[in-house]
Amino acid sequence: MSWVEAIFVLLSLVALGSALLVVTTPHLVHAALWLVVTLGSVAGIFLVLAAEFVAWVQVLIYVGAVVVLLLFALMLTRAPTGRQADLTVRRVLPAALVAGLVGVLLAVTVVAGFRDVRLDLDHTVVGSAGATGTAVFTVWVLPFEVLSVLLLAALVGAIALSRLRADSSAARGDR
Amino acid sequence: MPLWWPLLVASLLFAIGVYGVLSRRNAVLVLMGVELMLNAVNINFVAFDAQLRDVLHAGQTFALFTIVIAAAEVGLALAIVLLVFRTHGHIEVDELRELADRDDPAELPAPQAASEGVA
């Protein structure tokens, strides 16, 4: 096993372990902090898989912005910081069953389908900022523009939603 | 390294995300499960980009697009979660049952009946 493979396995184990903690921990804020560990190690996996720019975007957007947004949501909904027993539904067995079925099906399919394919990371094209930027702004420029319109729509939608005033909720009763 | 290593990691991460979405009651924790699933998809994109040695970098570009869509989704979902918190006082998804199907229309919950009375 080469050192690249060793690093990949290590990062994968960290990602999977912290992801398990994200979905099982009884502390609300700890879940967000474990999510940082998961997303960070996924960024490391991207680096190992020669996607340099995607890795830094992952660190900037996910670890920097998305987790902060989630923490803001927890803070604004007055999430208690202590241990909470009722964060998970009472009957977890059906959820675990469905998730386990999904995982086993996907894992068996991809392992059976790509068992003999090797990933040659020594001769692959490294997705540096230059290479990815050239690809985005030449070949993929139309999806990029569509995506910017989508972002604008999401922004306007979020503002419109958060400006729905209390008068509409007052008409609904004291809740 | 064999190609199925990253694909296996992505599958397991996706399954963990599915479990998070199904088992958590807090809406923000459900969102974290969705983020895990989106990240699993990104690992697949990047792995196949590296395997195909794509000169157009389709896989990495689409991973970037997925990240942008995830950011937009989180922004919108945060607005919705805050709105639900303002109108209901909690964000537990299994207690938001106003839209659930019922056999008997008489057993509507209180806030729904009140809003219908106003309308």
Image (cartoon, rainbow, N blue to C red):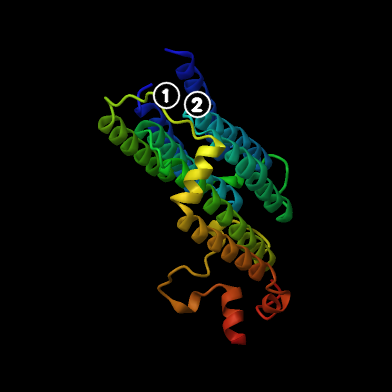
Nearest to the observer: residue B27 or residue A152? A152
Q: Position of residue B104 (x, y in %)?
A: 43, 76
Farthest residue to the top: give it.
A1
Q: Residue at x 51, y 29 (%)?
A: A45
What's the amino acid at mark 2? Val
A122 is higher (above) or lower (below) than B104: above
Q: Position of residue A116 (x, y in %)?
A: 26, 24
Q: Identify the residue position indicated by label 1 in the image.
A: A121
- For disc 1, the neighbor class at 10 Å (few under 14, some 14 to 19, many from 20) is some
Quadrant location of residue A172? bottom right
Q: Identify the residue position indicated by label 2 in the image.
A: A48
A24 is higher (above) or lower (below) than A166: above
Q: Residue at x 55, y 51 (%)?
A: B68
Is residue A137 found left or right of A107 in the rendered image?
Answer: right
Q: Chain of mark 2?
A: A
SS of the residue under disc 1: loop
